Image (cartoon, helix red, strand yellow):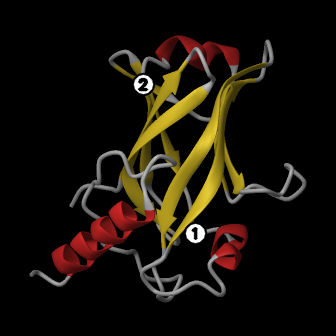
């Protein structure tokens, strides 16, 4: 079965981003693609997810610093089975999505490529269990309305339950 995957597309004019795909807390091998990011690998490409609104003061919930090329894209692997990520879901309902701040930047010549939000869905289970990857949801990001998010979560639940 394929890993869950997240696809990050930059909006250069605003340094914003569009995220497609879905991942869950406790997943350990999430494929991450930075669209047209291949040329950034040599400049120290970094993806950092942190609790939204923490002013960068806490340990990230997930970080990717190792990348390979995938056509024009940069491809990395994200681990969300970290103590920090699990703690962010401590008081969250089973089907809830938590939005994290996603920073994509280069470190050798420091430059912020984009800054935005990425939704991660809860996976209320033992940290020793490898979850089944969720079906990809297009455009589940900072622009989704509450009704759209609820509808997409309900679709995921139906898919997981084989409905």
Query: 53 or 146: nearer the eye?
Result: 146
Residue underneath mark 2: 35
On residue 94, which mark appears?
Answer: none
Residue furthest to the left in view is 163
In this rendering, would 41 be left or right of 28? right
**Spot occupied by residue 146 in the image (x, y as percentages of width and height):** 44, 65
Residue appearing at x 24%, y 61% in the figure: 135
The image quadrant where one finds the C terminus is bottom left
Q: Quadrant of residue 12?
A: top right
**Spot occupied by residue 124 in the image (x, y as percentages of width and height):** 48, 86
The image quadrant where one finds the N terminus is bottom left
**Spot occupied by residue 62 in the image (x, y as percentages of width and height):** 65, 54
Q: Label 2 neighbourhood size at 10 Å, few (<14), some (14-19), many (20+)?
A: some
In this rendering, would 126 be left or right of 51? left
**Mark 2 vs mark 1: which is more N-terminal?**
2
**Spot occupied by residue 55 in the image (x, y as percentages of width and height):** 86, 50
Q: Quadrant of residue 152?
A: bottom left
Query: 103 or 12: nearer the eye?
Result: 12
Query: 53 or 60: nearer the eye?
Result: 53
Q: Is residue 133 visible?
A: no
Q: Quadrant of residue 157?
A: bottom left
Residue 60 in the image: above or below residue 87:
above
Residue underneath mark 1: 81
Q: For mark 2, give the secondary structure.
A: loop
Residue furthest to the right in view is 57
Q: For mark 1, give the secondary structure.
A: loop
Foreground label between 2 and 1: 2
Q: CA distance from mark 2 to mark 1?
A: 24 Å
């Amino acid at each position: 079965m394929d890993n869950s995957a997240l696809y990050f597309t930059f909006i250069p004019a605003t340094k914003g981003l569009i995220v497609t795909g879905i991942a869950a807390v406790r997943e350990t091998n999430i494929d991450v693609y930075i669209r047209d990011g291949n040329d950034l690998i040599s400049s120290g490409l970094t993806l950092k997810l942190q609790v939204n609104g923490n002013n960068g003061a806490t340990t990230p919930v997930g970080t990717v610093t190792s990348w390979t090329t995938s056509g024009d894209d940069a491809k990395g692997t994200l681990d969300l089975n970290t103590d920090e990520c699990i703690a962010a879901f401590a008081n969250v309902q089973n089907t809830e999505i938590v939005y994290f701040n996603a920073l994509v930047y280069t470190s050798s010549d420091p430059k912020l490529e984009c800054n935005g939000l990425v939704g991660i869905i809860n996976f209320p289970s033992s940290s020793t269990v490898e979850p089944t990857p969720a079906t990809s949801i297009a455009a589940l990001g900072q622009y989704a309305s509450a009704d759209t998010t609820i509808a997409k979560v309900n679709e995921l639940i139906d898919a997981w339950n084989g409905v």
